[in-house]
């Protein structure tokens, strides 16, 4: 993920620590003490910036959206002229990001929402904003690809955009279950084939 060249303040250090620690240990297992230690700040600094751990969780989800949003905005899949090629290149880009250990490539908000969807509504809503907000960045290309092919399917650009995230988040779960990225990469390959089949017909429906 991109990092600022300016020296981070205590709040940014805590947010960066949250992105690393929570993706490694999960939200519930990540204590305030551990987050402070990873950030190199005091507990006093923590409570100066955040009322409690859940407040940090909400801020971390929004921060995740900010830093990953910048990364995806500058990614090379946007360079293709054909909107379907851009969409498929996006899927390829998601596969290419499956590098390093499992915590290095899995999603902060996907991790947090699985643990907090019932117990911490504010974190759940922040995770929803992040996931659906990212999905929305794909809708224009999907809609353009549909128009260029005169498609009148019984599904929407929004539903397909959200489906891409459902597959990718599920791929991350499989990676965690198996301890590696291979099965996640296979799931993303299936997603690519599925999108190709959807757009293979002028109606957008399977034959």
Image (cartoon, rainbow, N blue to C red):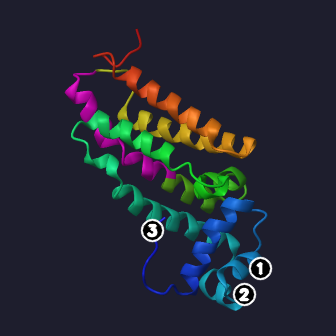
The reply to whether dot 2 and dot 3 touch (C-beta < 8 Å) is no
Q: Is residue 174 left or right of residue 161?
A: right
The reply to whether dot 1 and dot 2 touch (C-beta < 8 Å) is yes
Q: Is residue 174 left or right of residue 66?
A: right
Name the residue at 32% across, 35% down: 142
Mark closer to the chain start, 2 or 3: 3
Q: Which residue is mark 3?
A: 2
Q: Is residue 98 left or right of residue 197?
A: right
Name the residue at 55% across, 41% down: 168
Q: Can residue 86 be found in the magenta stretch?
A: no
How far, Cα to Cα, is label 2 from label 3? 26 Å
Residue 52 vs residue 83, the one in the foreground = 83
* Label 3 crowd bin: few (<14), some (14–19), many (20+), radius 10 Å: few
Q: Which residue is mark 1?
A: 33
Name the residue at 41% across, 28% down: 195
Q: Which mark is residue 194?
A: none
How far, Cα to Cα, is label 1 from label 3? 26 Å
Mark closer to the chain start, 1 or 3: 3
Specify the principal SS of the magenta part: helix
Name the residue at 43% across, 52% down: 133
Task: Examine the image and state in which quarter residue 33 appears.
Answer: bottom right
Mark closer to the chain start, 1 or 2: 1
Q: Which residues are magenta?
A: 131-151
| Residue 146 image point, x, y percent | 27, 28
Mark 2 secondary-structure assignment: helix
């Amino acid at each position: 993920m991109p990092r600022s060249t300016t020296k981070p303040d205590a709040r940014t250090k805590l947010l960066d620590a949250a992105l690393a620690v929570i993706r490694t240990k999960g939200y519930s297992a990540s204590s305030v003490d551990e987050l402070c230690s990873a950030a190199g700040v005091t507990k006093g600094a923590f409570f100066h910036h955040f009322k409690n751990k859940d407040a940090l969780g909400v801020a971390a989800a929004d921060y995740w959206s900010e830093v990953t949003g910048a990364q995806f905005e500058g990614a090379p899949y946007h360079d293709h002229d054909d909107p379907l090629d851009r969409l498929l290149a996006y899927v390829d880009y998601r596969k290419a990001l499956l590098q390093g250990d499992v915590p290095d490539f899995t999603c902060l908000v996907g991790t947090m929402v699985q643990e907090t969807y019932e117990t911490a509504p504010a974190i759940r809503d922040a995770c929803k904003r992040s996931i659906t907000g990212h999905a929305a960045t794909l809708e224009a290309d999907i809609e353009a690809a549909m128009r260029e092919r005169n498609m009148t399917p019984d599904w929407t650009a929004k539903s397909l955009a959200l489906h891409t995230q459902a597959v990718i988040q599920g791929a991350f779960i499989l990676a965690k279950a198996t301890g590696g990225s291979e099965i996640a990469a296979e799931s993303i390959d299936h997603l690519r084939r599925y999108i190709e089949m959807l757009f293979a017909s002028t109606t957008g429906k399977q034959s």
